[in-house]
Image: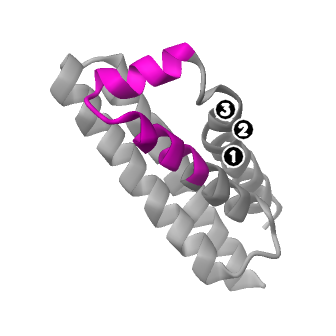
Amino acid sequence: MKANRIIFWVSTTIIFLFEGVMPALFSQTKDAKEGISHLGYPEYFGIMLTVFKVLGALSLIIPKVPGRIKEWAYAGFAIDFIAACVSHWVVDGFGFFAIFPLIILAILIVSYVTYHKLKAVA
């Protein structure tokens, strides 16, 4: 039980940092805007994506958020990571930027599985 709680909080914190804090701080930088346009997306898409990422990350990290909202956040992040992998693969070819979202997806899956293990015990 204690190990699951530690694994959940470590994996969820990593997701929170990558998908909540970093987009909130760096989404409006020149490099971030160039990255979005490099992939062929309009600038407003980056702003919309940032808002949803921050809201989703907050819903995962705040314990009092209802489970149904957390489920939507997990699903949204999974779709985001798969879409990021495909976008980078199509535009830049198979490389680190195509693989990295899948690594974060694996961390998200760990968070999701341990979330349900903790929920089943409670």
SS of the residue under disc 2:
helix
SS of the residue under disc 3:
helix
Residue at image coords 73%, 46%: 13
Disc 2 target residue:
21
In the rendered structure, are the residues bearing label 3 and label 2 in contact, judged by CB atoms less than 8 Å apart?
A: yes
Left or right of 59? Residue 34 is left
Residue at image coords 61%, 59%: 56
Dot label at residue 58: none
Badge 3 local density, few (<14 within 10 Å), some, or many (20+)? Answer: some
Above or below for 89 versus 119: above
Spatial CA distance of label 1 from label 2 is 7 Å
Residue at image coords 56%, 55%: 52
Above or below for 23 versus 110: above
Q: Which of marks 1 and 2 is nearer the N terminus?
A: 1
Part of the protein shown in magenta: 30-51
Disc 2 marks a residue whose amino acid type is: Val
